[in-house]
Image (spheres, rainbow, N blue to C red):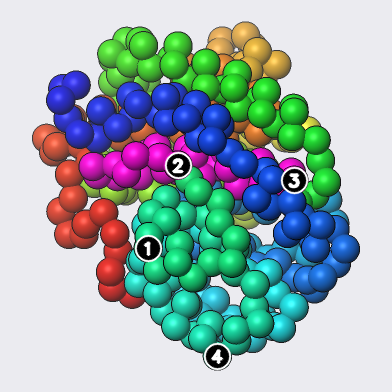
Amino acid sequence: MKENPYLADILTQANALGSALSRFDPKSLMSLADELQNRRFDRVIMTGMGASLYACYPAWLNMTSSGLPVIWVDTAELIHYARDLIGDRTLLWVVSQSGRSAEILALLYKLRAQPQVVLLGTVNDLESSLGQAADYLIPIDATAEQTVSTRTTVNTIAVTQLSAQLFCGQDLTTGLNDLEQTCRGMATYLRDWQAHLEALDDVPGLPETLVLLGRGASVASAYYGALVLGEASKYPAIGMQAAEFRHGPVEITNPDLTVLLCAGPLNTLSLNLGLLHDLVQYGAKVCWLSVSEETDLPEEHRAAGAAAISAPRAQGIGLPIAELLPVQLLSVSIGLRLGIVPGEFKFIGKVTLSE
């Protein structure tokens, strides 16, 4: 099983993150940070597709909570329905692992008519169309995966959050410490990958229906989780913001429903525990994903029937990164149970070339 390319990529993520942290260069972004602080731009648009879009969600949260005028929108909607958002004083932050997927190329073509727009690219292939067109670059610095996005997603979450802290005028020391601790937690977790895989075979196993929920930075984990389960294991799962689940979808709750609920940041922990309690009462199987001792599953909820999923230990901006690994291994587990090769593409390739 270890020879499976997708699993091999998963197991190298701690090393990839460590390498990206050692190469991250805030000096190359200082002039842009100054322009943001001096309000040269009337808005920042963060855009991408799929895992790239989800990976920059935590950075968007930080920037918008710090008072910067930031919009988070997928590139397809931006080029076809929200094109007028891009003005003369826009900083356009495009996140794309390949830098050459269909929507990114279409956006770059449309930008030819607006040469005054400042383009910031977060990209892995610096020789790609995005890498060549960008005025400023934030390299993802990951060896390209053989199949589904793993290393590049982890590194994108890391470098976009560090960049956002710089743009907000925040000290990077805490963020770097968070990510270094997360890197160590990932390495420890992945050393026991077989044990974690066996545990996931049991809980949650192969759910009849699976919903992934999160709040704050964990929304990125829920969205990515649903994406990677569909892409890597051909298993349909739903990823949602936890509060949105109460607004209607909660009506699907029954004994065949499994909910993977990310504990998330402390400031919404009580809300997630309340949702956990209600879902158990409604009859759902609930799996609690926590990456810190402060948010671990309370004993009373275990006694009521909720289950805890093992995850790497992390803190601060490392939280959404650590949450990805159990879901990646779950996609391997489910793929094997469905009789498919985890991570093997059926209809698409590594880069999406059609809209």
Residue 119: name its quadrant.
Answer: bottom right
Main SS, magenta region, reads helix
Camera-nearest residue between 329 and 136:
136
Q: Measure the C-alpha gap from mark 3 to mark 2.
A: 18 Å
Indicate the amino acid at tag 4. Ala
Q: Is residue 71 magenta?
A: no
Q: Is residue 60 visible?
A: yes
Which is more N-terminal, label 4 or label 3? 4
Q: Which residue is mark 2?
A: 141
Q: Position of residue 243 (x, y in %)?
A: 66, 47
For image coordinates 56% across by 56% down, the residue present is 137
Q: Which residue is mark 1?
A: 128
Crowding at label 4, few (<14), some or many (≥20) Cα neighbours within 10 Å? Answer: few
Which is more N-terminal, label 4 or label 1? 4
Q: Which residue is mark 3?
A: 166
Indicate the amino acid at tag 1. Ser
Mark 3 and mark 2 residues within 8 Å of each other at the beta carbon:
no
For image coordinates 52% across by 22% down, the residue present is 183
Indicate the amino acid at tag 3. Leu
Span of residues in magenta = 141-166
Which is more N-terminal, label 1 or label 3? 1
Camera-nearest residue between 229 and 174:
174
Q: Which mark is residue 113?
A: 4
Apparent side of residue 238 relative to residue 85 in the rendered image (left or right) = left
Q: Position of residue 10 (x, y in %)?
A: 33, 30
Indicate the amino acid at tag 2. Asp
Crowding at label 2, few (<14), some or many (≥20) Cα neighbours within 10 Å? Answer: many
Q: Position of residue 41 (x, y in %)?
A: 78, 71
Camera-nearest residue between 287 and 11:
11
Crowding at label 1, few (<14), some or many (≥20) Cα neighbours within 10 Å? Answer: some
Q: Secondary structure at mark 4?
A: helix
Seen in the picture, residue 294 relative to 126 is either above or below; the reply is above
